Amino acid sequence: MTTSNEFQFPTTGLRVKNRATLLAIDDVSLPLRKALCYTMTKPEVRQEPVLEARREDPNAPDNLATHFYGTVLHDQGKFRMWYYAVHLGENPDWPEAMRVQRKKVDASDLWQGPICYAESEDGIHWERPNLGQVKFKGSTDNNCIKLPHLQICEAHVIRDDDDPDPARRYKLAYWVQDEENIRAYPSLCCAVSPDGLHWTVSNNDPTDMFFEGGSFYKHNGYYIVNGQAFCSFTRSEGDTDTGRHGIAMLSNDFDNWIQEWGVSFVLPEPVDHDKRGPGKPYDQVHLGTGAVSYGNVAVGLYALWHDKPEFPDISADFGLVVSNDGIAFREPEKGYIYLAAEDSMPRQHPTKPMNTILCQGNGILNVGDETRIYHGRWRNVGWDPANADLMHDYHAEVALATIPRDRWAGLGLYKRATGIDTNNGGAWTCPITLPEGDWSLALNADGVAGLSVEIADERFNLLPEFSGENSATAQAGDGLDVPVKWPKGNLAELNGKTVRFRFRFQRSDGVEPMLYAANLTA
């Protein structure tokens, strides 16, 4: 039974309050189509970074790199960022517990971590407040967050207003590199906080295997960390060797984690992958999916890791994926590069050309009329921490790309097909159980004069008072949230019932309908 403000999706078992978003790229929510295909959106990239290393300050925790395997939230009326810093030279003020961890780490001039914090009024110009938590190279005047680990990579934060305990309002999933006599492999750790700044680390390790996180989100009532396992830690079909695999780990309560994991997203392994060995690399999924939950669907970016025999030759683009359960993701357009590394390049080295690796995280959020995609771009100098000269050239920065709100891709009519009417098409939704209270439908679309909406029962039988000449049409021009209205039908008659919506597309002179999303609001 639905409530006054809840939409149910019987196909997936999902229930979402207040608002459901039917994205054009979601072929589970829009499973049946005719004469329609995707037009992928090209993100607009801000060429200048929004946050980068403080090279001029040798005592800054991020004097070498600001890595965005991190998070941006719009919270408390401002933008808040958690990222992990990279610095040159050891911190002489490490406490004794970290010095014990230090004994396990190979000699290096490059140090990853700690997690750092920044704030912004507009999400473009950022300040690094003095938190006074960590003594770093002689001073506590820095933006470091105190955690009991020497080397930290990744800082994935959510605000969880569903947790009744205010001390657990913020939740953090992060990756710890090395700790003496604590864990066998670099892996996942968790912490909770009342304010996002002061953290209490969980006593329960989520997993005992090697795991690198790519994002952390809450979907369908589960806490999900999406990331990567690879090499000997996972196996491919037939118990063969494998490359990097995107996997998802789940928890009901953020304290106890299910030890079995779900395969989240994996690129096809070459037929001879088990015989390839070093020097015969292939494209893989780096750090799983950086995803965001829309309630009834999740959208994310994965790093398409172009593996090479020599590390400096590696680059990584972004691919686009979508999921309904938050675990298994799929590409709307297989193999499509959504954001190329060459389109979001970090600050270049003054004399040496270097490849770019794009880095995902908890960086997707809607702000007004745009979807912001905060991401990292890593200048690939190679990887040899013992080579001080090489590591001095290491660089990573936080970047920003945008698309119009929720316009990941548009669904529009064929243009060149033969043997089919390319001026008329349609798409059906999955069954949707409507709330008991008032609800409405709006379109995120262009060419709305060529779009109409019909309603049927869950067996595709059109309801006369909501279809044909009684179909809904747009009540405004093109836009991100265009209301539609059925001229005769009373929507209250459908409250609590399970229906399907049918979107009709019609091309005419000067009208090219393009649907990006449909928003159901209670």
Image (cartoon, rainbow, N blue to C red):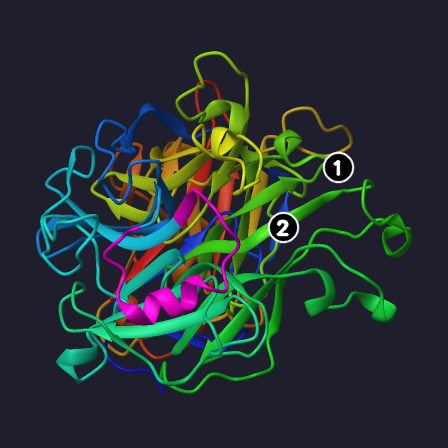
Q: Provide residue 260's location: percent of width, then percent of height.
A: 60, 81
- Which residue range is magenta in the image? 91-111
Front residue of 511 and 27: 27
**Helix or strand or loop: what does disc 2 sit on?**
strand
Q: Which residue matches tag 2?
A: 285
Q: Amino acid at mark 2?
A: Val
Between marks 1 and 2 in the image, the one whose residue lies nearer the viewer = 1
Asked whether the viewer can see residue 224, the reply is yes
- Structural crowding at the residue carrying mark 2, measured as other residues with C-alpha within 10 Å and reported as few (<14), some (14–19) or many (≥20): many
- Is residue 101 shown in magenta? yes
Give the label on residue 309, or none: 1
Front residue of 193 and 123: 193
Q: Provide residue 402's location: percent of width, then percent of height.
A: 34, 34
Front residue of 489 and 428: 428
Residue 395 is drawn in which quadrant? Answer: top left
Q: Is residue 492 above or below residue 83?
A: below
Residue sitting at 56 percent across and 79 percent down? 208
